Image: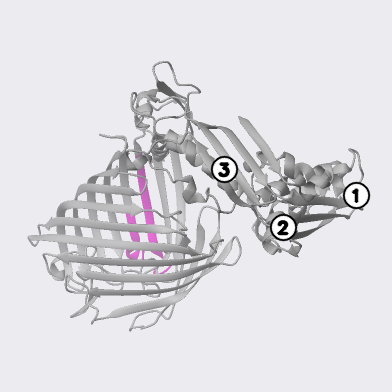
Amino acid sequence: MATSRTLSGRTAAERGSPRKRLLRAGLSAAFLAATFAPAPAAAFELFGKCLFGECRSKDDAEIIDPKPYDATVEVSSGGEADRDLEKAVKNASLIWQERRKPAAGSASLLTRAKADYRRILAALYNEARYAAEISIRWNGREVADLPVGTEFPDNAQLAITVRAEPSFRFGQTEIVNRAPRPLGRGDRVDLPENEGFAAGEPAYATTVKQAGRLAVEAWRQQGHPKAEVADQSISANHDTGELNARLTVEPGGYAVYGPVSVEGTKRMRPSFVARQTGLIEGREYDPDDLKRAEERLQRLGVFRSISLKEAEEIDAAGKLPVALTVQEMKLRRIGVGATVSTLDGAGLEGYWLHRNLFGRAERLRFDARVSGIGTTLDYKEFDYYLGSQLTLPGRFTPDTDIVINSFVEREVLDLYTKNRAVTSVYAKQYFSDTLTGQFGTFVSYGEYDDVFGVRRFGLAGLDSSLEYDTRDNELDPTTGYFARIAAKPFYEWEYGNAVGKFESELRAFHALGAEERTVLAARLKVGSIVGAPISQLPQDELFLAGGGTSVRGYPYRSIGVNVPGGVSGGRSLFEASAEVRQDITDSIGIVGFADVGSVADGSMPDFSGDIRIGAGIGLRYNTGLGPLRLDVAFPLDRQEGDPNFAIYAGIGQAF
């Protein structure tokens, strides 16, 4: 890549020593510099994990020649203190970040200090500061001038001083060889101007890099896989405080997909793996296709690693071959787990999984669980489940899975006891990264003991749903939405009723502040059943509320409709929840929440009846995989039989 480096005007750096002239010599190169995250600032460690602070590493005790030191940072802009710029410098400085950790001898400390010039320089460029002096001194001497072999005493004092002038703004901005306007919506890329690459905008180095990425991506989206920034010309005018930038893009040739080669398979069929990528030979190249190909392969659940690489060059026929290398996981897996609740007791569960039965990622899984332990000593009052699931991925299309389920279960709740068997077959379609659908058929038969007596129900029907999910994290979302609508028409043959069941749910998440340490979360769920009275429907098809993911503070599925002799599920449901999630440290957070729920006999929610409200506070501990959740909830309109409070524990947020 050819790069033009031009500076106009004189700066304090040009009048200083050679390390200060780094500002002049490294201007264009600094746009490729990385940023560095700040270290925490107090100290507390639990279970081997640093909850907050500068926890001491075990490696510190293994340093042969530890060289402790201390550092100070002084930053000014235009002759005045600049807290924001000081924070950026401290985040970039390895000397500052590692000041509580001894260096591995004087040589390591000297190397660390000299590397800080470029680190701080990159941080200044990221803040649009192109006129500054950087000084790192020890004992009155500039570190950059210290010879190799310099010995530092213990507790050496290093002083970092930065004198910066006001931030620059863009003067002239230009991108040569822009991609033409895309014809399809899927090929659209944000314009560099919309990302701040325009005259008068702050001239952040990251903005220039982003402009280059967007200009290249615009060509790649239109079938040019080898597009690149061939030249960048950047000049800073210190007299006017402007940065002029011109990026020249070389689009490279147009390409279609060539053949997909597969390596590393053992039990998997290479032809099936290649088909699952969805990359069709002769179709126009699109980088989004490669991303979707990796997601499809990961969804199979049989690969430990996946490497999908484009060929270095487009061949003479205009085709771009793709090489796929995979590493398969072990065929079988066994798992066990446990749950605990002050209301529902303890539970144990386990599963056995075969990942690849016949070479096309067929997954066979058996699950078993028992719960309710501790609430009673009578094993007949425990809940039981035994089921199997066979998943056939990539049937009909690479994005279509066929799932066959069968299970038997016994569930003992305060409102009813059921024993039933269910079998179902459905197709799951992945329309996009955010939209999935499911359609299938089911048959179930069971015996129910509830407020209406002991009855048997037989159901056969259809079950369909559509989900839209833009959450950034399924277990601990901070932004995005989750929406689900479901329709379940079925025929109940013991009473001869045709029934329609409908549900919809919406969850929304919004983070506050630049660091996103406060998250507002909300959930709304409604449901309706038409076609039969509640006395002629099984309780597990009727709507009930209450529990750790519903209305907290009340027993699981305990909120229903009052009928002669007790409580039954209803034909309509309304639930709403709101949470404020606040991070205290990087690992610990607290949550304040309120839940409301109502179940009615009619097919439409009726807010004139019994409305239950629960509220409480929760503790979260971030494990890296998902937050450990501990909630304490109180029923605000406690009825006879309701607990004074409830405690819930689990992994992941309540919703």
Name the residue that disc number 1 marks. 141
Q: Dot 1 lies on which element?
A: strand
Q: Quarter of the image containing the N terminus? A: top right
Res 551 visible: yes
Q: Dot 2 lies on which element?
A: loop
Q: Return the residue found at the far top.
A: 316
Residue 380 on the magenta segment: yes
The alpha-carbon separation of the residues under discs 3 and 2 comes to 35 Å
Q: In the drawing, what numbered circle is on residue 55?
A: 2
Residue 510 place in picture, x, y as percent: 45, 63
Residue 141 place in picture, x, y as percent: 90, 49
Left or right side of 85 for 322: left
Q: In the drawing, what numbered circle is on residue 209?
A: 3
Q: Foreground residue, 21 or 594?
A: 21
Residue 68 place in picture, x, y as percent: 85, 53
Amino acid at the residue labelled 3 = Lys
Dot 3 or dot 1: first in sequence order is: 1
